[in-house]
Amino acid sequence: MKRFRILIVLIFVLSLAFGSILIAKGSTDFAEAEDADGCTGAIAVGNVSSTTLVGQNWDTGYPWPQVFGLRMTTNEETGIKVIWDARYRKVPRLSSEGVTHTQNARTSPGAFTWKSETGNEKTLYGLDYGHAILGKAHSAKEAIQMAEEIAKEYGVRSGTGGAKMYGDPYEVYLIEGNGPDQYDVMQFENEAVAHANAYLSPKLKPTLESNSSGLARMQSMARLLALRDNTGYQFGSARGNIDTEYFMSLFRYHVWEWEDIARPMNKWEVGMQGDYGNICRWGATSGSTFASFAELPKSNTDMFSIFWTTAGIPHLGPYLPFFIGIPKIPPSFAVGEENQTKVFAELDKVVRFNLNYGAEVELFWQAFDRQTILECKYVKIDAKALIDEGKKDEAGMVLYDYVENRCDQAIKYAQELTKAINEKGLVKINAEIFYDWPEPPADYK
């Protein structure tokens, strides 16, 4: 009987492994999944952090990873440079004015999905309206003024609504809501704030609150932020308040062990779903696609503002620092044929069916990120010396050389980890087929 049970389990796991490849091959519309875009955002601004930090975990109703890609454009009228997560969602993230942008779509099971939704063309979620803001705004205040003008006439987002955050080194604004006149703006200057699929605004909070799928995640994020919110509480380190490394850990937050889950579930449900208060979701029906956040210093924002991003599941990959001062995105992460970010999706696929290696992979990338944070400090010193000499182009190349090298190292390590787990793991996975997305939209003026 024992052998029979083991055989059944192996057949079940192998069928899922094979089934995942069939899903990747046959499904062409990622957005058909329910409960898409269940993102969790976080803000640390003012006296809670040495630099403004604004970011989010990008969640999706589809559990399998995507090929990631970045793009950099320059607005011809303003000269403002913008980094986009271009291949995946075509969303502007960070500008050379030190202004950052995130967005969260409120959804609930059975609600519309990202692609199937209509009526967003002129809302804040429209490509030609809301997405053009970051290339025009010289501050978060200017960005939110543009956003509110659009919201007044067309709304933040059609359907069950959404939220956008605009931040700079001094303040962060949140605009959330539905159609015209159903929105609210909130300002943050000296605090840490969590956001998910639940309204923060007292004005909007009663609206569709029962349909929110993000309350547990928002509460978890708020609790983790509160541990360091200007209290001097040292959570596992001597660094004190909210910093870059802590922000990285926020978006990776999850539990590996079943016993850590408050509500009773079987091991399979917890191991593959893990969606109860976890910031980083890694489930059978939904999961975190990537995490990203902006680090906004008060000086040299046009060079040293950083878009930190993972290229896949946050706890199974590294954060890479894309300085706004670099002249272009390194080919391995840029949109195009040289993009190599599928290696992180391959690693996720292998770990998904060899769960015992998950914690080791996560610890490896945490060490990688700690080294990156330290190295960035020295790279900025070298670049700053060149900037002070009036050699900004040379400074940009110093930043670029480091970013490109770090991207290449991360790709190499991901390949080596995947190979090692595939050789030692119980289930070998051939992860050759991955989603790809078309070129991002034309440059915005």
Image (tube, rainbow, N blue to C red):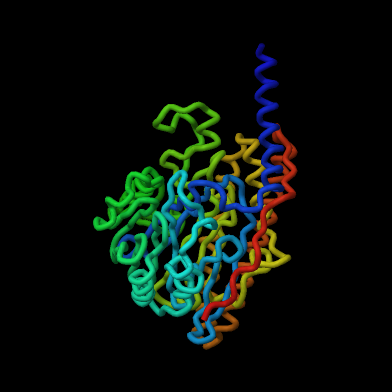
Q: Residue at x 54, y 60 (%)?
A: 309
**Percent position of residue 134, x then y:** 46, 74
Up/down of 425 relative to 29, above or below: above
**Percent position of residue 432, x then y:** 74, 49
Total marks drawn? 0
Residue 344 is left or right of residue 192, and the answer is right
- The residue furthest front is 119
Q: Between residues 312 and 18, which one lies in front from this camera angle?
A: 18
Q: Between residues 180 and 334, which one lies in front from this camera angle?
A: 180
Residue 413 is left or right of residue 216, and the answer is right
Q: Residue at x 66, y 11 (%)?
A: 1
**Percent position of residue 251, x then y:** 46, 51
**Percent position of residue 311, x then y:** 59, 56
Residue 279 appears in view: yes
- The residue furthest top is 1
Residue 169 appears in view: no
Q: Residue at x 57, y 50 (%)?
A: 32
